[in-house]
Image (tube, grey):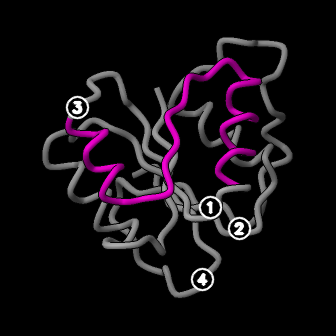
Amino acid sequence: MILLVDSNELLLETMQDYLASLGHECIATRDAVEAAEILAGEANINLLVCEQILSHHSGIELIQQAAQSRPAMKNILISSRDNVDVLPADIHFLAKPFSFDSLGILVTLFIPPVNQVMIPDANRLDRNARLNLA
């Protein structure tokens, strides 16, 4: 299951719909505090996709907080800001604006899609996606 966290409601709903079309189950929230509560209570989340700029916490802070209880969980940070240069090795980055194919490709690296027909073409990965494959 994927937890999506973004303050932009339209983007959040669109990401959720797109990932659902690949067969992924998602929980979506616009709030970092609610996201932390979901992470504390939902055992099946294995991927966190969150925006850097959130209310109450940054995306990096949310990821680091979640890593304390879920060290194996994968993370994708999304941001429209260019100042996210140095990230820990366990945080992957996708710059806004991004294509949904790029989001799908990154998610598919961590969670195979249920709907095999809809697997995004890896050749369409945006140049602004950064994977930390160390």
Please name which of the two marks, 4 or 2, marks the residue nearer to the observer: 4
Q: Which residue is mark 3?
A: 41
Q: Which mark is residue 13?
A: none
Is residue 40 or residue 77 the one in the foreground? 40
Choose top left, top right, bottom left or bottom right for residue 126. bottom right
Q: Which residue is mark 1?
A: 94
Q: Are marks 2 and 1 in contact (CB under 8 Å)?
A: yes
Point out the tag, 4 or 2, that comes first from the N-terminus. 4
Q: Which residue is mark 4?
A: 81
Is residue 124 or residue 37 the one in the foreground? 37
Going by the numbered disc 4, the residue's amino acid type is: Arg
Q: Position of residue 114 (x, y in %)?
A: 65, 12
Secondary structure at numbered mark 2: loop
Rounded to the nearest angstrom, the CA distance separating label 1 from label 4 is 10 Å
37 versus 121 height, above or below: below
Rounded to the nearest angstrom, the CA distance separating label 1 from label 3 is 27 Å
Going by the numbered disc 2, the residue's amino acid type is: Asn
State the residue at coordinates (27%, 50%). 36
Rounded to the nearest angstrom, the CA distance separating label 4 from label 2 is 12 Å
Rounded to the nearest angstrom, the CA distance separating label 3 from label 4 is 31 Å
